[in-house]
Image (cartoon, rainbow, N blue to C red):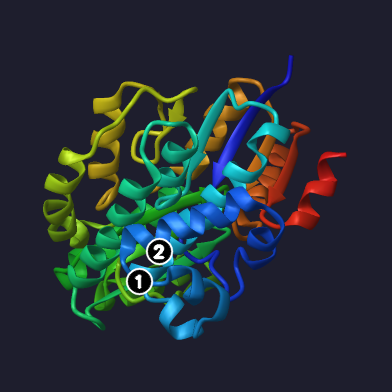
């Protein structure tokens, strides 16, 4: 029998107007927006609907906005979706997954990810860190390029996101990231792109944010989820509340092992994937990864009322 995974997007999937049509169509979705506004003490719903974009793009706003949109989708339409055998979320999306699986309360989560956004932004002064995407290179070549650049500059640069075959993001000190890109080019890499982000997420430079968030996460109440979560930092299927908590603490400076996460789900026989929330990035990644492995899967992105027509 086909297995099902629910996937939850991370930062970068936000857009002004997110969730507006869903809130208009579904009372359960509107209730989530009201809960978010109440928990945060400011009108996140207005920012999601109207922007401005520059304010929505601030990490402390982006993270609760994406979590809120994903939760709106789940609260409105979970009864029409196949029940998950597994779930996974990309970075911030791990919080969305835990809310969807009943392991974490929504208001606790939305307050926590706002604090997480602030902590990650404030861990490194603007301009000190950078991130860049490298396409079409092996993990070994990217890791070697980072090691070479770190040795040459005396600064930090590491792989931060293993998003899929030949899709790796690096992060660290801006100087070291530049040196790593030059090392990549020297190895024949041609497709590199600096990312418009304000901090070097998922690198050791985020350790101050990890230290700041550890007590907050330590005080949260976690429950056993309705199905296993495949976490970012280990790419392992986990359910124990303390293990879920520990994964959120370690993922702040740890790499997002998304390719390994999808491999685990494919190995477990998952053939139906539902990306719940804004954007379509994760559905595209899993389709490409499955195709490279010669597997056929269904991967649907559900974020607005018109998307529900895909379910038939």
Which residue is at 28% across, 53% downward? 112
What numbered label is drawn on residue 122? none
| Secondary element type, mark 2 | helix
Q: Which residue is located at x 69 percent, y 50 percent?
A: 302
Which residue occupies 49% across, 69% down?
45
Find disc 2 in the rendering and name its residue: 37
> Sequence order check: which comes first, mark 1 or mark 2?
2
Instruction: Return the x and y of residue 182 as percentages of the image width and height.
Output: 39, 75
Q: Is residue 234 above or below residue 96?
A: above
The residue at 48%/66% (across/down) is 133
* Quadrant showing the C terminus: top right
Side (left or right) of 267 relative to 102: right
Viewer-side residue, 154 vs 119: 119
Horizontally, residue 34 falls left or right of residue 290, namely left
Which of the two residues, 221 or 233, is positioned nearer the viewer here? 221
Q: Quadrant of the N terminus?
A: top right
Give the class, few, some or many, for how many residues have Cα within 10 Å of label 1's Cα (few <14, many ≥20). Answer: few
SS for callout 1: loop
Tag 1 near tag 2, CB within 8 Å: yes
Residue 61 image offset from top left, x and y in percent = 38, 70
Kindly tell me whether residue 40 is visible in this rendering.
yes
The residue pinned by badge 1 equals 42
Q: In which quadrant of the rendered view does residue 202 lie?
A: bottom left
Residue 86 lies, with reference to residue 176, above or below; the image says above
User: Relative to 31, is 158 on the left or the right?
Assistant: left
């Amino acid at each position: 029998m086909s297995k099902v995974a629910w996937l939850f997007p991370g930062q970068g999937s936000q857009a002004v107007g997110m969730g507006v049509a869903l809130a208009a169509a579904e009372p359960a979705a509107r209730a989530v927006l009201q809960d978010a506004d109440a928990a945060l003490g400011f009108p996140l719903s207005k920012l999601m609907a109207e922007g401005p974009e520059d304010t929505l793009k601030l990490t402390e706003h982006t993270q609760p906005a994406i979590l809120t949109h994903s939760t709106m989708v789940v609260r409105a339409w979970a009864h029409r979706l196949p029940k998950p055998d597994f779930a996974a979320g990309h970075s911030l999306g791990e919080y969305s997954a835990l809310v969807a699986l009943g392991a974490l309360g929504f208001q606790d989560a939305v307050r926590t990810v706002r604090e997480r956004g602030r902590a990650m932004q404030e861990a490194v002064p603007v301009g000190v860190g950078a991130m860049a995407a490298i396409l079409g290179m092996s993990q070994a070549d990217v890791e070697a390029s980072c090691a070479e650049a770190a040795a040459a500059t005396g600064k930090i640069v590491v792989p931060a996101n293993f998003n899929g075959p030949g899709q790796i993001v690096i992060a660290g000190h801006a100087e070291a990231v530049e040196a790593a890109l030059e090392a990549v080019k020297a190895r024949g890499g041609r497709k590199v792109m600096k990312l418009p982000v304000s901090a070097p997420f998922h690198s050791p430079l985020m350790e101050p944010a990890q230290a700041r968030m550890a007590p907050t996460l330590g005080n949260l109440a976690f429950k056993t989820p309705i199905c296993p979560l495949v976490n970012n930092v280990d790419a392992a299927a986990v359910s124990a509340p303390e293990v879920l908590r520990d994964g959120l603490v370690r993922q702040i400076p740890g790499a997002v092992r998304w390719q390994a996460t999808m491999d685990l789900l494919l190995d477990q026989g998952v053939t139906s994937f539902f990306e719940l929330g804004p954007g379509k990035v994760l559905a595209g990644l899993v389709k490409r990864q499955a195709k490279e492995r010669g597997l056929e899967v269904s991967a649907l992105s559900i974020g607005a009322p018109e998307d529900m027509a895909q379910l038939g």
